[in-house]
Image: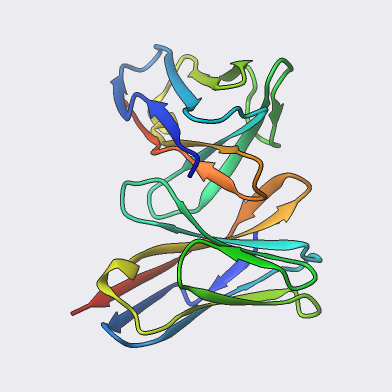
Amino acid sequence: QQPVQSPQAVILREGEDAVINCSSSKALYSVHWYRQKHGEAPVFLMILLKGGEQKGHEKISASFNEKKQQSSLYLTASQLSYSGTYFCGTANDYKLSFGAGTTVTVRA
Amino acid sequence: GAVVSQHPSWVICKSGTSVKIECRSLDFQATTMFWYRQFPKQSLMLMATSNEGSKATYEQGVEKDKFLINHASLTLSTLTVTSAHPEDSSFYICSAEAGDPWQYFGPGTRLTVT
């Protein structure tokens, strides 16, 4: 079952902050965050594991509330390069189910 | 980081023909690769899991006879769309695991069936 993401879209000016939420009706063991630019493949941003471990490539922070089965991705001091569609993915065994995505547009 | 390539990056074919898409892990061995389909402005939907040396595992609703998957080596998986129709037009993306608990995605293949 797909996780639910909110909001669907957000428009920011450079330097502004935003939060993207991801929730699941099932117990979460890990949450993955990816960003996809138009016409390109998704790029891994971060994984949050049950128990608090996090691993990520970029300076983007996220939280994982196991009890509430939710995760949030924090875009702080946004840059133009942050524009794209952000997907959260929840893992069931080895398979990922992706949310519908949140389109982020950062304007100068 | 691990690199996954796909070929071709885009393809146009006529209705009724078959198209093969290749997914390669360039600098690592991938025992498991995944195939996704993405329609415009929609999310990625897992089609199947491809395991080296064994039959692919298809998601519910995905026709295994239409979307043939072969994972012949640890670096190559192929997806063949047989008897393609316009409704098969989509963005097909593969991914692989490289020992990390996340997936590395290929650049995708845009298929247009006319």
Specify whether residue B114 is in view: no
Quarter placement of the C terminus of chain B: top left
* Residue B69, position as x, y percentages in the image: 59, 20
**Does A46 appear above or below B69?**
below
Total numbered circles: 0
Judged left or right of residue B101, residue A44 is: left
Which residue is more in the foreground, B30 or B80?
B30
Query: What residue lies at 81% left-to-right and 79% top-to-bottom?
Result: A67
Query: What residue lies at 50% left-to-right and 17% top-to-bottom?
Result: B80
Query: What residue lies at 72% left-to-right and 62% top-to-bottom?
Result: A30
**Does B40 appear above or below B12?**
below
Judged left or right of residue A16, residue A27 is: right
* Residue A106, position as x, y percentages in the image: 28, 75
* Residue B72, position as x, y percentages in the image: 61, 13
Which residue is more in the foreground, B104 or B54?
B104
Which residue is more in the foreground, B3 or B22?
B3
User: By what rule are the colours in the image chosen?
Assistant: rainbow
**Does A33 appear above or below B80?**
below
Specify whether residue A52 is in view: yes
Q: Which image quadrant is residue A107 in?
A: bottom left
Query: What residue lies at 48% left-to-right and 26% top-to-bottom?
Result: B23
Residue at the farthest left position: A108
